Amino acid sequence: MQSLNFQQIWRYQDHLIDGTLHTLLLTLAAALIGTAIGLAGAAAVRSGPRPVRWTIRGYIELIRNTPSLIQLFIVFFVLPNFGLRLNSFEAAAIALGLYFGAYSIEIIRAGLDSIPGSQMEAGQCLGLTRWQVFRHVVLPPALRNVYPAFTGQFVLLLLGTSLASQISAEELFHAGGFIESRTYRSFEVYAVICGIYFALVMAFKLLFAAVGRLAFRWPVGR
Amino acid sequence: MRTFVLADLLSLFIALQWTVALVIIALGFGGPLALVLALMRTSGRRALRWTAAAILQVVQGVPLLGLLMFFYFGMPVFLGVEMAPLVAVGIAMTVYTASFLGDIWRGGIEAVKHEQWEAAACLGLSTWHQFLYVVAPQAFRMALPPTVGFLVQLIKGTSLASVVGFVELARAGQIASAATFQPLLVYSIVAAIYFALCLPLTLWARSLEARLNAAR
């Protein structure tokens, strides 16, 4: 049994901070790309022509039934063949964005489907325009319904960004590998890295819970 | 540089056996642990409940890659022992499976109304028999769709074992890709194999869920 020595790790705190920032940046970039895909995809699945709907369904099933590691490799190693030069961070953001997008389409679609058609008809009977119906009748309860699943998926995305280290994007595990190669303190390094992820996950969970309480204060109607 | 030949395809399918083996190991060891965690999490004793809750929170708040690195690189150095890759990867996948299945099964147990326990107690059943004969069968029905859904996550998750050099499907793909310089072809085949493995399970989970919703 080896004695623990965390001091050596703290000497590389600049690398840890930098890695943490890149992990957060990657998460946000992928979440933005994925949410855009989710909104557009959910709209298209609900009201697009049949070929579009089938294409989107195919995309969702393809992404959800293959490992994100392989998706990452395909984006990183294959897109350059088509003349698209990407650095590892951009490739990771795109691959994880496509991954998050597939799950968000499903989440957003389920949220919109959860609003009964009769409510939209009631809105129209009150003389609201289509946009007003969407903005005031459909959107608030739909947002509330998707909120837990969406924020949960965001946390999984945060954990999933760790894969980007495999195409050597500079995030936490990349920093971890560097520190490990300098200190040979594998146990301490990965304990600290896992601890940082855990702290980030807990911080986001608390933040999402607080925002959810503030944003959705009206009572649940049936 | 050489072309992708039949032998490469064969190497992928040989490696696929290790992917399946990892899934079986994770379920075989992680499943019983998950049951223990689910029972602890729903138990009447506060200490047991909190311990289980803490374990579930921590493991689910850490990336699977972190678990793998920790058990493969960290643990052997700390304990000063040699650890075979299969053992380290097996432990990481087991811990991962136990925590996610434990949470899913906790949900199943909690979905069974508390009156069911009380009614079973009134019939004179012991606590274990209350669970085994009354609660577990009902919880099983509720928890089956998400359990099958998790199986898909687990199959996809085994691809991370490639990171520590364990030769399963994803790693065999990396090797074949490096040897042939045909990443598009190789990774498409690898993705197709995973897809063929996961899609039937996804569809099964969906039909199970639809049936469960129709029954309620």
Image (tube, rainbow, N blue to C red):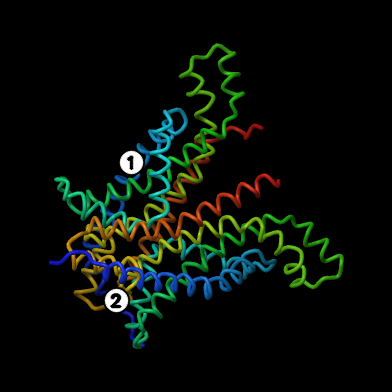
Please state, as top left, top right, bottom left or bottom right, where the N terminus of chain A lies in the image. bottom left
Kindly identify the residue that appears in the image at 56 percent across and 56 percent down: B146
**Can you give x and y, in whole percent of width and height, for residue A66 in the image?**
38, 56
Please state, as top left, top right, bottom left or bottom right, where the C terminus of chain A lies in the image. top right
Residue A17 seen by the camera:
no
Nearer the observer, B133 or B38: B133
In the image, which disc is placed on residue A32? Answer: 1
Side of A218 relative to B9 (left or right):
right
Kindly identify the residue that appears in the image at 41 percent across and 63 percent down: B157
Side of B167 relative to B46 (left or right):
left
**Can you give x and y, in whole percent of width and height, for residue B72 in the image?**
34, 76
Q: CA distance from mark 1 to mark 2?
A: 34 Å
Q: Amino acid at mark 2?
A: Ser
Nearer the observer, B46 or B176: B176
Badge 2 crowding class, 10 Å Cα cut-off, few under 14, some 14 to 19, many 20 or more, is many
Kindly identify the residue that appears in the image at 57 percent across and 18 percent down: A123
